Amino acid sequence: FSPDGKQIAFSGGRYANNDIYVMPTEGGTPRRLTFHSAGDNISSWTRSGEILFSTNREFRLIERPQEVYTVSPTGGTERRVLDAVGFDPVYSPDGRFLAFVRGDINPVFREDYRGPSNRELWIYDTRTKKFSKLPGFETNDILPQWADARTLYFLSSNDGAYNLYRMKLDDSG
């Protein structure tokens, strides 16, 4: 749901690959916002009302992991948000931090995997322009969501099955 609660954004594969769509919460015809041949997977909204999504575009031939993009709900050209690969991005409620996931092609259904391809949580500090790897577990840490400006929830398979964890952050991330 958009920050004002008036729109719903979603990913849909109506034209073979996932694209980003938006529609009014009271119903109506969805409007397609992205048209790239790469799959676009919605993650969240920004405080300013743009849609964050993960995709493979610029680094596809170099890196396998996805990149973080944004698009206006009114349409227009998408733009890359980070100069790093990552996916499942979500801004903290105050807009200071962008939490996202980094990791290689390790599928999340390999819950007990421990190795160099596991998925890890990172944050980007919009104030200092620095990236930081968050202290997580040796297994997959995925799907970050903010509870408040300094509390991050995520799933981890540290116990052999995915469970919900909470991490408190200070002002430096």
Image (spheres, rainbow, N blue to C red):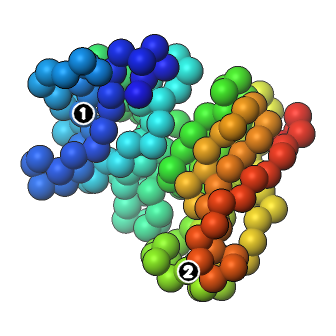
Q: How far from the left and from the top, in percent, is residue 89?
A: 54, 44
Q: Secondary structure at mark 2?
A: loop
Residue 21 circle label:
1
> Could you tell me which quadrant the C terminus lies in?
top right
Q: How far from the left and from the top, in percent, is residue 21?
A: 24, 33
Instruction: Please tell me which residue is depicted at 76% across the width and 65% down the height of the picture.
Output: 136
> Could you tell me which quadrant the N terminus lies in?
top left
Question: Pointer 1 and pointer 2: residues touching (CB < 8 Å)?
Answer: no
* Local crowd size for mark 1, using a 10 Å CA cut-off: few (<14), some (14–19), many (≥20): many
* Of the image marks 1 and 2, the number of the one nearer the N terminus: 1
Residue 3 vertical position relative to residue 157 in the rendered view, above or below: above
Left or right: residue 106 compared with residue 32: right
Gap between marks 1 and 2, in whole Å? 31 Å
Q: How far from the left and from the top, in percent, is residue 112?
A: 60, 85
Instruction: Please tell me which residue is depicted at 52% across the width and 36% down the height of the picture.
Output: 81
Task: Please indicate, yes or no, whether residue 77 appears anywhere in the rendered image.
Answer: no
Task: Please indicate, yes or no, whether residue 53 appears anywhere in the rendered image.
Answer: yes
Q: Secondary structure at mark 1?
A: strand
Instruction: Please tell me which residue is depicted at 75% across the width and 53% down the height of the picture.
Output: 166
Q: Amino acid at mark 1?
A: Tyr
Residue 111 circle label:
2
Left or right: residue 49 compared with residue 152: left
Looking at this view, is 129 or 71 the one in front?
Answer: 71
Q: Amino acid at mark 2?
A: Glu
Residue 67 vertical position relative to residue 103 in the rendered view, above or below: above
Looking at this view, is 170 or 8 the one in front?
Answer: 8
Left or right: residue 92 compared with residue 57: right
Residue 142 vertical position relative to residue 31 in the rendered view, above or below: below
Instruction: Please tell me which residue is depicted at 17% across the width and 28% down the height of the picture.
Output: 30
